[in-house]
Image: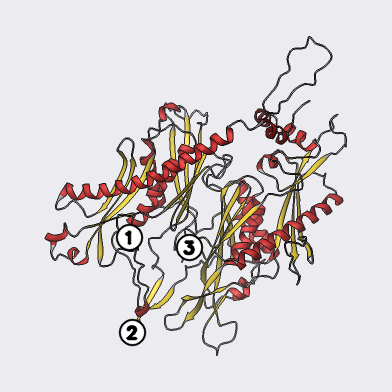
């Protein structure tokens, strides 16, 4: 057991030092506990990882029977289940179908400059609707009941990620009239509306990465039934025997989240570092972080398939699509560059796992 | 579907509203409900694992064929110290059951509906008697059940059958006891998983409660009034029933119970259907006995899960060899 002890000084008459067990130290002084770990050489986090190391994750797709697509992602002690269900939106005769085919406009947003966030957060959305549920008893910290601050923030962040990355080609969600004599716009009778529900089963930090990865994997596994307009019944029917995947963009971006742990000036801090960046923080580290950096990047695997012998980045191209930083002023350009590289290698791993999972369907 | 006011706390669908997909099928190839292939006195395989969620006191995950649910136990933790909180000499237990939006054929909203509240109160009844609540005064124990997947009551709700080309008939493949059987299997799973999670949380209990469900079926002709006299002899009791009734049978009643095997006590009993009208108690006793037998087999799984967990904790807390322990720990000094 490691103990917190005072360095023995020369005086023999000193009272015995106050010692704590590691677990108690962890509880009563989380900031100090974390800093001591990170200043150790080599720096090791309390969970045993090195600062730049992310958690191992597992991915399972299509394990739910009622969802059109689903994925379960487990990264360390964070576990999320994502289920995607398609429902049908029937276009009324007078409606302009083009209003649905944009990620940035929604029926109510015409009057609001800030898009779907008009009307004080309560508004109608587009065809792809993500929601996160945290009141599943996933952690002690979040009370049950209606979504709290974090759940609402996450839902909104995911909504924004979907709007930015445009993962689904909205034109492919059209449901047509079978009659070929009509013009192409009047043929559109409805749309598939994708409900993306992410349930957090177990929460131990960095839920955004896990949720986004689950959403991407679930979208890839989604199969919708063939739907068409039935003229005699004047409604949309589906064919229960034929299913089709939805058309998605070629390469997916993935998010990688970093946390910055502040290190105060102290005698132990010989290197004089002001803060240490850690990859994939758990909830203990998240509580102490002063800055959170999220990088959304795409890794295009190109034509060369990275085999097990090759490094994961061989033959791949990386593109950063979005960087988001919350709080503080400590992260500099050089650190962002390092993070971008780490994000790229993580995105490459995500992509590889995703392809492996798709090749061996459950 | 007419759109209601948007939920201010969540992302909403387009204001036009959406409808679940409706399938078209000709009656000739109408999907016949799948026949259960196991014998009537056999229960499905149960997968039960505890302690998967590290950030709560106790948790469990249960899987019975399509049914998947996760239980977490929060607490015992102190009641909030407000003037409005009454003094509680015993722990206050709250139970919540929630279906995931994708857990059933028709998408469920996030707001709890009446059937979820009903399941929650039945789960409360099954557990409240088993917990030694007097040991936890002024505190609160929360049991949260999230159902991720279930064998739904209405797998054929959204199918329209076309007969002779023209007429559409919306056949709902429902029989009278369908919803009860579906909810019964879910409730029995909730009870078993919740007591595993309570045990994992280290909450003192008189006994582990396991859930059992059984349904009594009769031949279809009997239910229509003919040969009512033989109804007793033709009765078929099915433990852990599937949604689809056995060939040519029609359900009479479903019994769900929470059973404490070591004490031979029933903490929750829910019988719905027509039973006990004729040969009164005998019929009901038989049904309850079948449900108890189902609960006993669930108890076997529960015991194993509890044992596994205890073994895991013993292995983890056992003092590691000194050489190994020192290399993994970092010394804290200063």
Question: Residue A199 bears which disc, if any?
Answer: none
SS assignment at label 2: loop
Q: CA distance from mark 2 to mark 1?
A: 28 Å
Q: Earlier in the sequence, mark 2 or mark 1?
A: 2
**Could you say which is closer to the camera, residue A143 or residue A310?**
A310
Instruction: Classify residue A304 by image quadrant.
Output: bottom right
| Depth order, front residue of B206/A218 | B206
Disc 2 versus disc 3: nearer the observer? 3
Compared across the picture, whether B200 is left or right of B265 comes to right
Find out whether the residues at labels 2 and 1 contact each other: C-beta distance under 8 Å: no
Q: Chain of mark 2?
A: B
Figure check: B165 above or below A83:
below
The label nearer to you, 1 versus 3, is 3
Q: Position of residue A269 (x, y in %)?
A: 85, 33
Q: Is residue A105 visible?
A: yes
Q: Residue at x 21, y 53 (%)?
A: B275
Mark 1 and mark 3: Cα distance apart in space = 19 Å
* Residue B178: image tag: 1
Residue occupied by mark 3: A65
């Amino acid at each position: 057991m490691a103990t917190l002890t005072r360095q023995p000084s020369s005086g023999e008459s000193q009272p015995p030092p106050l010692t704590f067990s590691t677990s108690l130290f962890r509880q009563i002084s989380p900031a100090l506990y974390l800093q001591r770990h990170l200043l150790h050489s080599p720096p090791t986090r309390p969970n045993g990882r090195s600062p730049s190391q992310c958690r191992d994750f597992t991915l399972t797709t299509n394990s739910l029977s009622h969802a059109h697509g689903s994925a379960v992602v487990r990264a360390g002690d964070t576990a999320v289940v994502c289920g995607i269900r398609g429902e049908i939106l029937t276009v009324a005769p007078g409606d302009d179908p083009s209003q649905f085919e944009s990620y940035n406009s929604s029926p109510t947003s015409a009057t609001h400059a800030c898009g779907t966030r008009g009307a004080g957060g309560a508004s109608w959305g587009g065809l792809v609707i993500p929601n996160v549920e945290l009141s599943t008893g996933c952690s002690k910290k979040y009370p049950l009941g209606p979504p709290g601050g974090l759940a609402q923030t996450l839902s909104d962040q995911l909504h924004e990620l979907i709007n930015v990355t445009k993962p689904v080609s909205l034109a492919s969600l059209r449901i047509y009239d079978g009659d070929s004599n009509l013009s192409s716009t009047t043929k559109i009778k409805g749309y598939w509306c994708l409900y993306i529900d992410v349930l957090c089963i177990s929460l131990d930090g960095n839920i955004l990465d896990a949720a986004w990865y689950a959403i991407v994997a679930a979208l890839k596994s989604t199969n919708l039934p063939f739907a068409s307009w039935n003229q005699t019944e004047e409604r949309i029917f589906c064919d229960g025997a034929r299913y089709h995947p939805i058309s998605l963009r070629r390469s997916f971006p993935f998010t990688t989240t970093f946390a910055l742990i502040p290190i105060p000036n102290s005698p132990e801090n010989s290197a004089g570092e002001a803060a240490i960046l850690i990859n994939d923080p758990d909830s203990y580290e998240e509580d102490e972080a002063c800055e959170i950096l999220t990088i959304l990047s795409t890794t295009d695997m190109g034509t060369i398939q990275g085999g097990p012998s090759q490094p994961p980045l061989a033959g791949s191209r990386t593109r950063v699509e979005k960087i988001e930083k919350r709080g503080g002023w400590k992260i500099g350009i050089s650190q962002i560059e390092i993070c971008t590289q780490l994000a790229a290698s993580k995105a490459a791993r995500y992509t590889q796992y995703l392809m492996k999972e798709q090749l061996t369907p459950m | 579907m007419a759109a209601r006011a948007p939920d201010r706390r969540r992302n909403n669908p387009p204001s036009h509203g959406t409808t679940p997909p409706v399938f078209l099928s000709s009656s000739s190839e109408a999907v016949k409900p799948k026949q259960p292939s196991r014998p009537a006195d056999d229960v499905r395989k149960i997968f039960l694992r505890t302690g998967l969620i590290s950030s709560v006191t106790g948790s469990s995950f249960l899987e019975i064929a399509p049914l998947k649910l996760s239980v977490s136990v929060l607490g015992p933790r102190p009641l909030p110290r407000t003037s409005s909180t009454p003094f509680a000499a015993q722990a206050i237990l709250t139970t919540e059951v929630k279906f995931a939006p994708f857990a059933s054929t028709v998408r469920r909203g996030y707001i709890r509906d009446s059937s979820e509240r009903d399941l929650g109160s039945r789960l409360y009844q099954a557990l409240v008697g088993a917990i030694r609540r007097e040991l936890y005064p002024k505190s609160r124990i929360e049991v949260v059940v999230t159902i991720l997947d279930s064998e739904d009551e209405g797998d054929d709700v959204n199918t329209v059958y076309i007969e002779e080309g023209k007429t559409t008939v919306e056949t709902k493949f429902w029989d009278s006891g369908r919803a009860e059987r579906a909810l019964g299997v879910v409730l029995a799973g909730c009870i078993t998983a919740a007591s595993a999670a309570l045990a994992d949380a280290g909450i003192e209990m008189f006994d582990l409660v396991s859930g059992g469900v059984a349904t009594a079926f009769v031949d279809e002709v009997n239910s229509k009034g003919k040969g009512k006299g033989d109804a007793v002899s033709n009765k078929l009791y099915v433990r852990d029933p599937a949604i689809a009734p056995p060939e040519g049978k029609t359900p009479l009643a479903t019994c769900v119970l929470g059973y404490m095997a070591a004490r031979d006590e029933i903490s929750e009993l829910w019988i719905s259907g027509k039973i006990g009208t004729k040969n009164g108690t005998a019929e009901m006793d038989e049904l309850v006995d079948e449900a108890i037998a189902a609960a006993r087999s669930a108890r076997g799984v529960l015991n194993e899960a509890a044992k596994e967990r205890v073994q895991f904790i013993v292995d983890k807390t056992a003092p590691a060899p000194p050489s190994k322990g020192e290399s993994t720990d970092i010394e804290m000094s200063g």
